[in-house]
Amino acid sequence: MKDDKPTSFDIAYRAGVSQSTVSRALRDSPLVNEATRHRIQAIAQELNYKVDKNARNLRSKQTRTIALLLCEDQGIGDSMINPFFLSMLGSITRACANRQYDLLVSFQQMSDDWHADFEDAHRADGIIFLGYGDYVTYVEKLIQLNEVGAHYITFGPVLPGQPGMSIGCDNYQGAYKATQHLLTLGHRRIAFIGNASEHAPEFKRRYEGYAQALSEHGLDVDPGLQVNAETSEREGRAGIETLSERGVMFDAVFGASDLIAIGAIQGLEALGKTVPEDVAVIGFDDIPAASYTHPPLTTVQQNTRLAGELLVDNLLKMLDGEQPESFLLPTDLIVRGSCGSPTKEN
């Protein structure tokens, strides 16, 4: 009995393309231009063509699954996930679903050998990393992934000579704009709370942008106004306590993350200070909680929706044999009540 079910070769004949182009188009590969993808997908729909995922995966030896490994953060709370990554998680999930991929989510700390536990074990075709803890030890593991030919992409710092591909935000320019905003408002003694070392390169770039803005205004960078801190409200509160114990004067605080800035507001309130009347506060990330603090937090916004889509798209390019370059995404300054009127500056 003849099987009349349409095949990808039928679609290829109708569309005037190769069967491999049909396969790529039906999984929304960016290697096929948009007009051709839409034409192929329309023909597939007209023919009522259904992809046999199991057969396709068996032929290609692909799992059609992407692993997303989050950095477990003990200082965040019960979830142990930095809230900044939660909105990006939604974007990555949506991007995978739109491209007919499944998403496997786990913590980085749950595995000692990422490649063996995911790619070699045929649980995933590639890995997306969000967060890294201590970057110095993290990058050593990325070098090991390179040595075994793993397919992976990271969201984080973009540094010369770093292993693999990374997408990140322009931390330097974002912090520069934020500090310029505080300076425009008349603040001159601006404290910076965040770890400014090679162990936290994104915070370090934010500190460098902050320092450049001060320098351009003829102000010295006072080491006494910088306090090392990791991303948590507790560390933000502790940073304010440290500044108070040092006896330094400050009229504004730049938290290297929103969680640090929110903690700083709490610390200032404990000292009887009013935000922004006594001390202005600004953060970085624009997590959902930033707009619900009292007062609402001025912050540097990272485009998590676009970042999630680009992480998936560029990982799929790697799986198709391409070698995309690392790059930075621009930021926006979101001005709220913690240091100014609620408007948006690009």
Image (cartoon, rainbow, N blue to C red):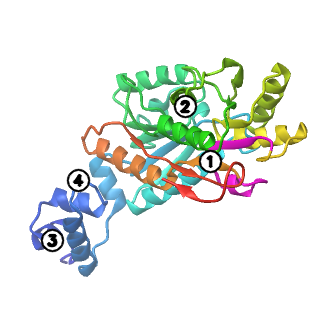
**Residue type for callout 2:** His
- Mark 3, secondary structure of its residue: helix
Foreground mark, 2 or 3, reads 2
Q: Earlier in the sequence, mark 2 or mark 1?
A: 2
Q: Is residue 73 above or below residue 85?
A: above
Q: Earlier in the sequence, mark 1 or mark 3?
A: 3
Q: Which residue is mark 4?
A: 31
Could you tell me which residue is drawn at 19 percent across and 66 percent down? Answer: 36
Query: Which quarter of the rendered picture does the N terminus lie within?
Result: bottom left
Q: Position of residue 106 (x, y in %)?
A: 58, 42
Foreground mark, 4 or 2, reads 2
Q: Earlier in the sequence, mark 4 or mark 2?
A: 4
Give residue 285's quadrant in the image: top right
- Mark 1, secondary structure of its residue: strand
- Mark 4, secondary structure of its residue: loop
**Residue bounds of the magenta highlight:** 278-296
Q: Earlier in the sequence, mark 4 or mark 1?
A: 4
Could you tell me which residue is drawn at 37 percent across and 59 percent down? Answer: 99
Label 4, label 1: how far apart the Cα atoms are? 36 Å
Q: Nearer the viewer, residue 246 or 182?
A: 182
Going by the picture, which residue comes out furthest to the bottom? 46
Which numbered disc covers residue 217? 2
**Residue type for callout 1:** Thr
